[in-house]
Image: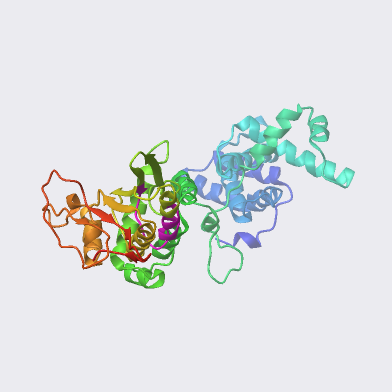
Amino acid sequence: MRETGQLEPFDDLDLLADRYARARLCADAAARRRLREAFVRDALPFAGRLARRYRGRGESADDLEQVARLGLVKTVDRFDPDRGSFTAYAILTITGEIKRHFRDYTWGVHVPRGQQDRVLDLVQARAVLTSELARTPTVTELAERLDLAESEVLVAQTSAAAHSTESLNAPLGDSPAGGEIGDLFGADDGALTLIDDRTTVENLLCELPARECRLLALRFWGNLSQAEIAEQMQISQMHVSRLLGRTLTWLREAMFSDTAPVWTAPGGPEHRVLVTTGPQGVRAALHGEIDRDNANPIRRELLSAAALCGAGRTLVVDLSRVPLMSAAGVAMLNAVYEVTRGRGLTFRLTGTQPYVARVLIVSGLRNLIDGRSDCQGRPDHLAVQGRHGPPPRREALHQQEAPTVVRAARHPNGDLRRAR
């Protein structure tokens, strides 16, 4: 068989069809098959001319010519010389096959046939108006040319966008990294569900003292260990562990409650000294831990409370709400004791918790501890009287007797003496 690309078009296709029809009448099956093949081969250039009319519409020329040749074969098989011209029949059949191919196989999304025809009319009308107006026509102008409503033109424009699609695996420009168009599409961001939690935590962090905020920053943003944090903040690693646990517990409780719990640790608004006066003197109740960050403010408040006491009265410091105390807290209590001793007041500590009592004993302030807070679990009621002379002797008192009392007295010569 000759190369189809080298075939010359037959000038009078109807004459060739008439010869094929007469020869077919008196031929057997094998001869008919040969005659059919010869007629189709001679008419292939005609199908190619029809296919080239539809070039430039997003479909390859080879595919269009293949569809046109299939239409030619159907025309030859269905041709009846008694019903009219072969050329006219071939044009209708081949053109119909090409249009059906565009309708059924070239749309990326299924669109109704009527809408497809409207899209084709829209494309032709846009091309004509663009040539006439020397600009892109508006929707109103397209609607007037097509005799359609503007809404129908808008629907046709939307449908036209679904005609051709592009693969998500297509290369993205000339990128050396070999990116694909699909890389531009985002995926579900799992962090979206954490937006509410992040916002809540940001607001809660604003309620924490500066020390706790710095501690969290060093631990979770700086990725420092507890030992490294302790070195930077100049505190013990145990203290860092306690601070982290307390802060994270507070944040966790605040996250799952409608109202954030009150921060009662040092530096918070609720870490305070509650002072009440009575006939026997002044009572100061401390709340929260005592360390170097709040020792000075607490010392000033206790000294202010001591100023409310007259000579011979008692300043009672309640430590029942103090779970921890650092060396700065011990020094603060010792300083307040010295001042109250100089003013002739009685200084008394009550409600000391076991850990705080142990810290005071190790620091040499055992005589300031109320007997009910002995860290060894047995009563150790101490009464220490401030007086001139040798240190007082430690005496064991009954459990029903008064708690530890530390008195400061003034010597006749005006000097202040503290009982050792």
Q: In the image, residue 93 lies at what x, y percent?
A: 63, 38
Task: Judge by depth and name the residue closer to the eye, 278 or 34.
Answer: 278
Q: In the image, residue 1 lies at what x, y percent?
A: 54, 60
Quadrant into which the C terminus falls: bottom left
Relative to 359, is 135 on the left or the right?
A: right
Task: Judge by depth and name the residue closer to the eye, 323 or 187.
Answer: 323
Q: Which residues are magenta?
A: 285-301
Compared with 86, 248 (above or below) is below
**Residue ranking furthest to the front:** 412
Rendering colour mode: rainbow
Q: Is residue 85 visible?
A: no
Q: Is residue 152 visible?
A: yes
Task: Judge by depth and name the residue closer to the eye, 197 or 110.
Answer: 197
Relative to 120, is 201 on the left or the right?
A: left
Q: Quadrant of residue 157?
A: top right
Residue at (32, 71) in percent of width and height: 227
Compared with 297, 105 (above or below) is above
